[in-house]
Image (spheres, helix red, strand yellow):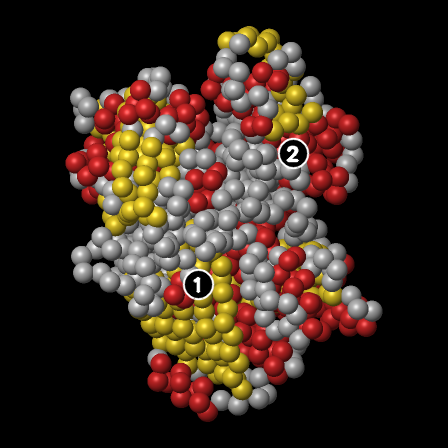
Amino acid sequence: MQITMTVNGTDVTNEIEPRVLLVHYIRDVLRLTGTHWGCDTSNCGTCVVLMDGQPVKSCTVLAAMADGHAITTVEGLATGGTLDPVQQGFMEEHGLQCGFCTPGMMLTARALLDVNPHPSDTEIRRAISGQICRCTGYATIVRSVHWAADHPAGLTEADAAGGDPSALDDSAGTTTEPGAAAAEAAQAIPAAETEPEEVTA
Amino acid sequence: MTILQEHAPNPAADDAGRPIGYGRLQRKEDPRFVRGRGHYVDDITLPGMLHGAILRSPVAHARLVSIDTSAALAHPGVVAVITGADLLGLGLAWAPTLSADVQAVLVTDKVRFQGQEVAFVVAEDRYAARDALELIEVDYDVLPPLVDARKALDPDAPVVRDEMEGRTDNHIFDWEAGNKAETDAVFAAADVVVSQEIVYPRSHPAPMETCGAVADFDAVTGKLTLYETSQAPHAHRTLFAMVAGIPEHKIRIVSPDIGGGFGNKVGIYPGYILAVVGSIVTGKPVKWMEDRSENLMSTSFARDYIMQGEIAATKDGKILAVRTSVLADHGAFNATAQPTKYPAGFFHIFTGSYDLQAAHCSVTGVYTNKAPGGVAYACSFRVTEAVYLIERLVDILAAKLEVDPAELRLKNLIKPEQFPYPNKTGWEYDSGNYERALRLSMSMAGYDDLRREQRAKRDRGELMGIGISFFTETVGAGPRKHMDIVGLGMNDGAELRVHPTGKAVVRISVQSQGQGHETTFAQIVAEEIGIPPEDIDVVHGDTDQTPFGLGTYGSRSTPVSGAAVALVARKVREKARFIAAAMLETRPEDLEWEKGRWFVKGDPSVGKTIAEIAMGAYGTVALPEGIDGNLDAEVTYDPPNLTFPFGAYICVVDVDPGTGHVAVRRFVAVDDCGTRINPMIIEGQVHGGLTDGVGMALMQFIEFDESGNNLGGSFMDYLIPTAMEVPDWETGYTVTPSPHHPIGAKGIGESATVGSPPAIVNAVVDALSPFGITHMDMPCTPARVWAAIQGRPRPPI
């Protein structure tokens, strides 16, 4: 059968078998390999793409069902050479490790921010709850989406200074935003037995 | 051995504030991943490439009577169908495992677990290959399966490995550590002894990317290029040379971007071998990617230890000794991946973080009709099982003695001045300040306030639990005098080349599956020679491009390969000193190093940067005798000892008495991995491991029914934590460098997977203590927790 759809702003038409899954159409026919496959049972969400702006799991959508619709994949997130703030946020806040679930996570985040520009932690967690990440433990993904919400225009020059060498280790401390108790606790711990200047070389 | 940095530190940041060396730094690999430009095995398409699919057994134990492949061969698009009989003819029906056993590549005589490989179809596209699987007719003569490891050594148990000559039982090995007589004597004299059977259930690493390969055999040159999901490309190359008879110099293994590994991608699976056979038979490249059920049902499982644990103490709470006997279910083939001398991995670190008088463990491994594996899933070679055992026993002892579990631990932890600490089973712990870490975690958690809150809630009938675990890991395998895998010493190589313009390439033998090696290893070089990390390319995952080494698992990348990289950079730095001296017409001993530059002692304005020295090295500078015209070096690192990261974790749970649902409300994790290279990446590694812990403690479980059917064969049944099941992690750290590691780093990749399950289970048991409950086996599912509250027998899942 023949299908026609818009993928990342470009019209595409192909002759396909009716049973072909959207994820296989995107990967094998269009050769857009940023969309991944992970489970076949609609549980892992690594195959998420946007169909008319809504996240769908492309392993459980037939390519034929996308006929006449607009699909956005990770390759369509950046506009021109400029990354979407969501893409920048994932880099800023370490929202990815192996990178396999990342395209789907970022597309869901984009869809969320389009309807809810300032989501709460819970709203972000709920939005990505149909998707699995085995590496990050989700907290940094939540932070990444917040970063994107806080920077709707993306990276500014003030943000561009990447690392923070002043954050080099002392001998003990907390790395989460500590509550008052945790901050006090870090203070209360005596300095390391080892010479800190060796550690912070 | 040099300890830490012997050179003077400097501010170490570029104009944009990015560290030249250690510190928080965005990952160099991220720009390609956020653009969808990662390059995973399934993204590879070669000209003329065919697709393979595996027919798997629907039953756990059966004689293979016949296979009829004629209909499959006639199916449009099918190019070849390979069976076990075909492989017998090629001498490839059985392949060696990483534990001196063999594993069937395709069944020839008997199916030994559900999901075992029976036939391989090669077709022009993946749909045709799958269709053809349905057309293969197999006649099985079903046999009674051996499912319960406890029955494996019964005289009437079905014999799983009856193909082995003379074998009449399912026994694989007995192994022990520690001193039994000494330990028994301490137990006999102790005031208090508590005992508990503790089961660490079968689990699966389930990386997001399943396993797969693209094999490309060139019949003219005889060269095999194999793109694989492999955590250990060099070891795989040597093993493929042994298995397939292809000379090793004609094998190139490429592990491109890997979508998570966690130990699942250490072994060599039948699918990889079948892709190679398929390519040799058809003369074309063959891709094989397993689906999720194949991944969960046939590739390396983890854990499956039944542990009888005992702990002895004085009545005032001084822990004296531990002992355990373990029954290890290894499945149908002994295919665990651990150092040869240690069939139970590093389980003998089950003495934990406590100063003991005696300890003894014995482990018996058995075959069953289940998938092979056993050492996988971020376990640091069975340290997960060891830590879970000791940390559960300490909590059970605390309940018996009616003392606070934190107090009991503080009383018994090894003290800072006792390091290096020789434990009772043969380890020498390198360094630690355990009390400091535990007190930091208690302060972060607000431990006393939590106990007050718990008392108030108990008065109202609410179930809140607080669980503690303290763990000591043993990672960075390992010294070649003790440790090898199939005869290969567990060392790693590194090569560093500084180009004439001062940019560098470092080639390493370990393989990232998301750990950020391209960033941290560049940071190690940057710290040592002062070239900014963005000017250093890290090359890995291609055996034609990198030096030999054993790969990434057991948290060994930083402890072993990280050391190699630091040392190779120091070698380059020292060479640069001689070249700089020639350029400055002075003596090498008159030069002093500051990050990125050699200068004349007492005259800092006269010096040469690494880039200037590099240009000099390749240029026309008259070089001193014995110095080649380059700025390169290579090393292979043999660690003198393992490293011993540690940590203190506190978990707070709320249990719904009506449903048995456990909610993890808070989790505080204090880790000490020695010197910290990139704190952002370390925190990410910890977060991921904590999430694994929630999965193992509460959700994930590969269970079997009495027929040997795998009940965890999809993500509908094998439940992985989502963002809704985990809290916002609270992490802290202490820094106790390893004294024998060149940069003092200890490794972090698996600490949280090791340390978190006992903290969570301890919290659940603590919440249920009003019901007289002192132990629960993982996973603490709602059904199991509810049944425990009701005093009913434990349901299977």
Q: Which residue is drawn at the image coordinates 70% and 22% (left, top)? A: A53
Residue B287 position (above or below residue B341): above
Q: Is residue A133 visible?
A: yes
- Chain at numbered mark 1: B
Q: x, y (%) of residue B217?
A: 25, 26
Q: Is residue B488 visible?
A: no
Say which residue label 2 marks: A89
Q: Residue B521 location, x and y as percent?
A: 44, 43
Q: Within 10 angstroms of label 1, few (less than 14), some, or many (20 or more) residues? A: many
The residue at 65%/64% (across/down) is B787
Asked if residue B137 is positioned above or below residue A27 in the image, the reply reads below
B794 sits left or right of B107 in the view: right
- Circle 1 sits in a helix, a strand or a loop, which is it? strand
Q: Give the number of the mark in front: 1 or 2.
A: 1
- Give the side of residue B659 with respect to residue B95, left or right: right
**Location of the C terminus of chain B (image quadrant):** bottom right
Label 2 crowd (10 A; few <14 / some 14-19 / many >=20): many
- Left/right of residue A129 with respect to residue B31 in the rendered view: right
Q: Could you say which quadrant of the image residue B137 lies in?
A: top left
Badge 1 amino acid: Tyr
The percent position of residue B469, horizontal first and vertical second, equals 58, 66
